[in-house]
Amino acid sequence: MRKAERNLESYLVKRVSDLMYQARLDAIKKHEDCNDNQARTVELTEEQYLTCIPSWCSKDAWAFLCKYWTSNEYKDKRKAAQASRVKSKDVAQNRGGSRPWGETQQLLEYKFGPDKAGTLNTYAIMKSGFKNMDNTGRSAPIPSRRAQNRLDNYNARTQLAENSKELDAQALYCMEGGFAHGRVPIADGVVDKETLIAAKSSNIRSTNTAAYRTMVEENEQLRETNQELNQTNELLIEENSVSHQMIMSLYANLKRQPLPELLSRLANIDARRQQVTASAHAAATNPIDMLSANDINTDDDDDDYVMNEDDDSYDGLDEHDDICDDLDEDDNSCDGSGDNVGSEEVDMHASGSE
């Protein structure tokens, strides 16, 4: 029951947001006698907006909207959204109109059966256009490379059947390294909030555990390498000692003395060797060097090595029904096919529209 209520609330938020976006375009079309594409490039004055009130909106709510659409706050948000869109050469544009994920999936199942309502085909159709699919319900090629890469990435991570409706929260969370812009890349708003929070928590724990284990393995490898170098060094010292004794014996047999500068250099080398040996013994008492593999707890449940984050936080996750970095002409919401497209954010707390 709670899941149904959340899905309904998510759907209504999306529809109201789309309605507010389309209301401005409809007012401009009425005033300027133009289509949606032309209306997106036009801005009216507050007085001009007021003359184009729709039949379904109260006067107080419409007056609030007209004032908001001509405010600096709205214009700044609009410019920022347009600039964000321009930065990307290949946005994962949504070509399914304003129809959300769940509704698209239900429509596919109604028209073509459950086999065509799987996650992969639903996403592909939303990115290639509902009108462009063939008569069997299979999607047309996705024009956006970014959207195709997302689909391939998800498919490779999950290895689910083509007609599966299952949404893997862990895969969705990890695909782009967490909540990019507060969203998951596929079917945003459809996956339960609690499931995504659990995926986030699991990813934090597994990532840090893996990093810690890698550190332990590297430390053990360095210890083994150091042991091998010490053994090699001991052999070299012994070999040099034998060579030194042989040379000194040769000088004694010849009844001659080595050059004084050579004896001085040998004395300096011996002094330096003694100093290095003393330093090595001191370093051996370092706590890090005293660690052994048996001293380190690599258990997954060891919370001492888990990042301290609030698992109840949600990174501002939206509950839009599809991928919402699909930017339209005027804002940073989902683009459509010419009507009822994405929405610009409007703070309706004081709108009086109730």
Image (tube, grey):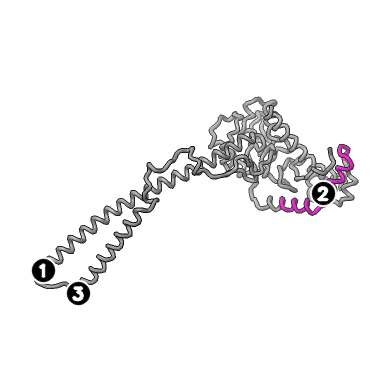
Residue 351 in picture, x, y percent from top left: 83, 43
Residue hosting label 3? 260
Q: Which mark is residue 252?
A: 1
Say few, some or many: other residues with alpha carbon within 10 Å of mark 3 (under 14 / 14 to 19 / 20 or more): few
SS majority, magenta: helix
N-terminal of the two: label 1 or label 3? 1
In percent of the image, x 14 and y 66: which residue is there?
248
Name above or below for residue 224 compared with residue 242. Answer: above
- The residue nearer to you, when weighing 230 against 321, is 230
Residue 262 in picture, x, y percent from top left: 21, 71
Number of the front mark, 1 or 2: 1
Three-letter residue code for mark 2: Tyr
**Magenta stretch holds residue 84:** no
Residue 185, quarter of picture: top right
In percent of the image, x 12 and y 69: which residue is there?
251
In percent of the image, x 82 and y 49: which residue is there?
68
Q: Quadrant of the N terminus?
A: top right
Q: Is residue 139 visible?
A: no
Residue 230, quarter of picture: bottom left
Disc 3 is placed on an element classified as: helix
Three-letter residue code for mark 1: Ala
Q: Is residue 15 visible?
A: yes
- Is label 1 in contact with label 3 (beta carbons under 8 Å)? no
Decide if residue 1 is on the left or right side of residue 157: right
Residue hosting label 2? 68
Q: CA distance from mark 1 to mark 2?
A: 104 Å
N-terminal of the two: label 1 or label 2? 2
Q: CA distance from mark 2 to mark 3?
A: 95 Å
**Magenta stretch holds residue 57:** yes
Residue 128 in picture, x, y percent from top left: 66, 38
Disc 2 is placed on an element classified as: helix
Magenta stretch in the rendered image:
54-82
